[in-house]
Amino acid sequence: MMNHDLRSMPDRIEMLADIAIIGGGPAGIAIARELADTRIRVLVIESGGRDYEAETQALNSVENIGEPFASAAAVPEGRGYTGALAWLNDIPAFELRNRMLGGSSHTWIGKCAAFDDIDFRNRPWLPLSGWPIERAQLLPALDRAGKLLNLGPNLYDESLFRQLHSPPDDLGLDRQLLQPFFWQFSHMRHPRAEPTRFSRLALDITAGNVEFLTHATVTRINVDGEGRTVTSLDVKSPDGRGATVHASTIVLCGGGVENARLLLASNSVLPAGIGNGHDVVGRYLCDHPRTSLCRFTGGDIDAIARHFNFYGLSHGGRTHFYLRGLSLSPKIQAREGLTNCAAYPVQIHAPDDPWAALKRLTKGANGTFTTDLLAVAKSTDMITSGLYNRLIRKRGLPHRSTELRFDVMAEQQLNSASRITLTGQRDRLGQPLPRVDWKIGTREIDSVKRLARTIADEFTRVGLPKPRLSNWIDVDEVAGALFMDMAHPSCTTRMGTDPRTSVVDTNAMVHGTDGLFVAGSSVFPTPGHANPTLMLLTLSIRLADHLKQRHAALRSHTPRRSEPGLSLHQV
């Protein structure tokens, strides 16, 4: 990885590249990797450095006037099945973004799933639903994204059953109501236990045509006098050093909040901002409202955990594990006008869980040796059966837990009033702060309630323990609902064919602005319920293919200026 730090470069330096990528998170790094070892000169511009820096992170401040959020303490992701989220309880909504190389991959746990077929369809009960590209068109890029994330086969529904080493039992649940849904988890190959960090993937880029510029915040996208062609970028370092990056192609990869913010703030030629001739930039803000549906305690935990756990398969010389959950069937969504949503199990492990104790013992954790040794000694049967399940049957480990609950992430209906705008306040680089007005609608709340009650009814019908519904669902008091945002902002620069309701076209280029592209979850036409990383990487890889074709065409009409490598000069 070839890196330039703007803090150590002369003030007012100018740089020349073929493609400038704004943002060194998963989308930006994935595109850079795809463009490596080509004749295209690529510069990845990252606001932060390789490590967390409070000064840079402070640039994420927003004015939040929308839905309240619950902290991770109020609705914990939990440990065990899904691991521990690196959330900080005092981080306000929509500020959990990472201004550092690797971006949001520093705070995710690797949870991945592809969008469902229904997510791509035009659903009459959901205004503006339907993607302008078909799911089948994305399958080759989806497989490449899965390979980048070290995932197993991209199967997340009942079709996975026949691939599993020991598939789940058929519980007799009504498929007209509930359908199986699976998630898998992306991990680095070395170390195996760590979720994939894109900062490490950036370090693997050794091609001479790809360079990085760190501690460089883009403050403005510049266009020609008529606003029809992108020309350059204004960039600042934390200490106020300025730079200009000239590029014929710019790819905005700043995330669901920052992509909209920068387009709106780049208003020197177009007063409403770039791509905002129809007041669409920043609208249709979605996230994944998350809450707990129901819970099990006591002996009911094991009765549920034996069916809703991890299931493994062998693929590419490795064992990949998938977490089993449940989703509302497409039929019930259509019949009752609901959004897509899925529930997944979360176990809260007891203090004397033997597997946690074993992990601490192997790591030499201080102060718990005797307690952990006793926990392991009294659990030899659980450990023996667990190893058999894991190694032979390729199933999840049994745990000693105090609670098992089902949490849900729901798709949101598009709402033009749910949006990002700019405030009169400015950060220390002089940029206007984003004002976030996130709205959760009644349709997604109704969908969550329907899923919870359907799970309770179906479990009871087939003889599984009956769960205790969350109180607000049980008594039907929406005012008591406790939702949190999942730091999955999307749809703020959505893809579409109509500039009146979208910001980018099917190739992710901003309507009316040649050479300016957007990547990431902000271009999702609709948000689905699945974690966004796998799908945003799929679209990013697809975009990289288009950029290669675009620059091959440009090169055939324009003399080559130089060999790969940035042109730098000081004003």
Image (cartoon, rainbow, N blue to C red):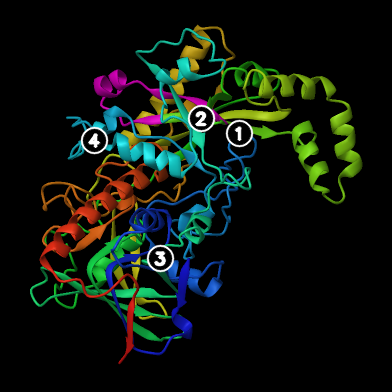
Q: What is the distance, in whole Å, between disc 1 and disc 4 at their CAs?
A: 33 Å
Q: Which residue is labeled 4 in the image?
A: 137
1 vs 2, front mark: 1
Tell me the element at label 1: loop
Q: Are marks 3 and 4 in contact (CB under 8 Å)?
A: no
Using the image as rendered, state which of residue 118 and residue 419 is in the foreground.
118
Using the image as rendered, state which of residue 140 and residue 106 is in the foreground.
140
Does label 1 or label 2 sit earlier along the sequence? 1
Q: Residue at x 16, y 46 (%)?
A: 496
3 vs 4, front mark: 4
Q: What is the distance, in whole Å, between disc 1 and disc 3 at their CAs?
A: 32 Å
Using the image as rendered, state which of residue 186 and residue 72 is in the foreground.
186
Would you place residue 311 above or below residue 531 in this image? above
Would you place residue 299 above or below residue 478 in this image? above
Amino acid bearing label 1: Tyr
Q: Residues within 10 Å of mark 3 (few under 14, many from 20)?
A: many
User: Magenta residues, as a range?
Assistant: 318-341
- Asked if the magenta segment contains residue 331, the reply would be yes
Q: Which residue is labeled 1 in the image?
A: 81
Tell me the element at label 4: helix
Q: Residue at x 13, y 69 (%)?
A: 558
Does label 3 or label 4 sit earlier along the sequence? 3
For the view shown, which residue lies furthest in the bottom direction?
A: 571
Q: Which residue is labeled 3 in the image?
A: 62
Q: Residue at x 25, y 19 (%)?
A: 335
- Asked if the magenta segment contains residue 300, the reply would be no
Please indicate, yes or no, whether residue 214 appears anywhere in the rendered image.
yes
Amino acid bearing label 4: Gln
Residue 344's disc number: 2
Q: Are marks 1 and 2 in contact (CB under 8 Å)?
A: yes
Does label 4 or label 2 sit earlier along the sequence? 4
